[in-house]
Amino acid sequence: MISLKKILLDYGLYVILAASLFCLLLLILHAEAIYRADNMVVSGVLSSLILAFIFIQWDAKKSATAKALNLTYVARDLAASNVNIAEELKVKTDAKQQVADDGREFAEDATQFAEKGRASAEVATLIAEKANKAKSDFLANMSHEIRTPMNAIIGLTNILLMTKLDAKQKQCVSVLQTSADGLMVLINDLLDIDKIEAEIIELEQVPFNMIALLERVISVMSVRAQEKGIKLDVHYQAGLYKTFIGDSNRIRQILLNLVGNAVKFTDEGTVSIFFANAGTADGKRSLTISVVDSGIGIPENKLFDIFGKFTQVDPSITRRYGGTGLGLAISKSLAEQMGGSITVTSEVGVGSAFVLHLSLAVEASGSEDQSYEEKIIYLDKHENSMQLPILLVEDYEPNILVATIMLKTFGYRYEVAHNGQEAVDLFSPDKYSLILLDVEMPLMDGFEATRHIRGFEQAKGVSPIAIIAMTAHALKGDREKCVAAGMSDYIPKPFNPHQLQAMLIKHLKKNDSGKAA
């Protein structure tokens, strides 16, 4: 809306000029009249107003000019200020850009560093994998190389104990057997640690009789206990359930270790085993097997350390009692993999109590099925001699001696081949009742020999003969490798006469059943 002041300033002067012109026109039209004083006053007033408005207009224009000039100055100052602000903004923008550039460069450097780190980690992983594989290969090779002569040592020791010996000879052979068994425990402990670290321990789930298992443990450890003159006994809680489902071999391994340690570290007194129920949970029966001794005991500050690898309470313990310090570490790991645990209490000079806690499923039918080794029946030698001969394929002379003596003792006839090629050349259908085949041999190994024999049988359309791998390869996957090559079964070295006879009866019975069918 237009203001009154602006209207007066812009249009008032024109109104006054119009009025003055009108008055002048009247004067001209009345010239003949006497010029009167009131006309002069009006003209004077009009002239004053004209001058006043001219001044006002001039002052207004001057003020406007001043304002415009001030505005110009303000605009210039604002422009200068804006320039300064723009320059400051540019400086800040440049600084931010520099920071961004530095950040980008830092990020690029970090990325390159991360890539180098990842590459280094990959290289380190490859090195670690190669080192681990080298360790596993070394252990596998050492296991094979040690087991091969150990088979002869343990085999001949068992054979000697089956012969008539005087007291001194029997004592010497018994010491030899104990030493050989101790060496095999060491070898198996090292292999078990490797398996546990690689997380490749597999647990069986088969029915077994816990009472029978404990009795076998007592039977094995009683000889050593008698030698030291200490009492070894077992106590069963009334109303025990006997048949469980689990890995009996691993449980026996744990108990042999616990009882063996108790006997080892007890010089006089008693080692007792207590088997008790501990309730039912989640459809399984909880049980405890306690091994209590009156031995040297363990200091309280060492109770948690004894389950570590290669750990002994005191270096003098190793010198006096021997051992690797691996048994308890392996036992603890196996118990935990079964969902159980091992606890210990001890007092120096009084004794120790190790308790195995397990929770196992039970066999609903109460079946107490036994393995071939547990229910083995030794056949009459005459009956064995009526069998077709067994082909023994072995290149290591001491092991040939062990196997042939065992076969003679059982009453079997046999022939010997010293490598896989010789075995293939000797083989023909219905010539042998069974083949005992070593795996690693010169000229042709057991795997290739098996493939040749199976190919020959397939071509002739005859029933396959039982081929038993008899090898010092005893790591995870070795049995599967033998079966995949076409072998019927697997017996790892070293083996005792009992194990060999069980394997022979198992497969010779199958052959007889097949022929009868």
Image (cartoon, grey):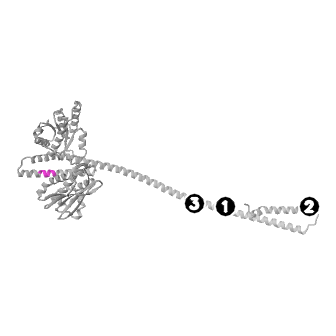
Per the image, the residue denoted by label 1 is 72
Determine the residue positioned at 34% across, 51% down.
121
Residue 318 seen in the current view: no
- Give the residue type at disc 3: Ile
Determine the residue positioned at 70% across, 64% down.
66
Determine the CA span between mark 3 and mark 1. 19 Å
N-terminal-most mark, 3 or 2: 2
Q: What kind of element bears circle 1?
A: helix
Determine the residue positioned at 9% across, 47% down.
160
Tell me the magenta residue range. Answer: 176-181
Q: Residue 441: where, in percent of width, then height? A: 19, 39
Residue 327 vs 370, above or below: the answer is below
Q: What kind of element bears circle 3?
A: helix
Task: Check residue 179 for magenta coloring.
Answer: yes
- Give the residue type at disc 1: Thr
Q: Residues within 10 Å of mark 1 (few under 14, many from 20)?
A: few
Q: Nearer the viewer, mark 1 or mark 2?
A: 2
Residue placed furthest toward the top: 460
The foreground one among 97 and 450 is: 450
Q: Residue 149: where, in percent of width, then height? A: 15, 46
Per the image, the residue denoted by label 2 is 29
Per the image, the residue denoted by label 3 is 85
Residue 512 seen in the current view: yes
| Main SS of residues in magenta | helix
Determine the CA span between mark 3 and mark 2. 71 Å
- Give the residue type at disc 2: Leu
Residue placed furthest toward the right: 32
Q: How many marks?
A: 3
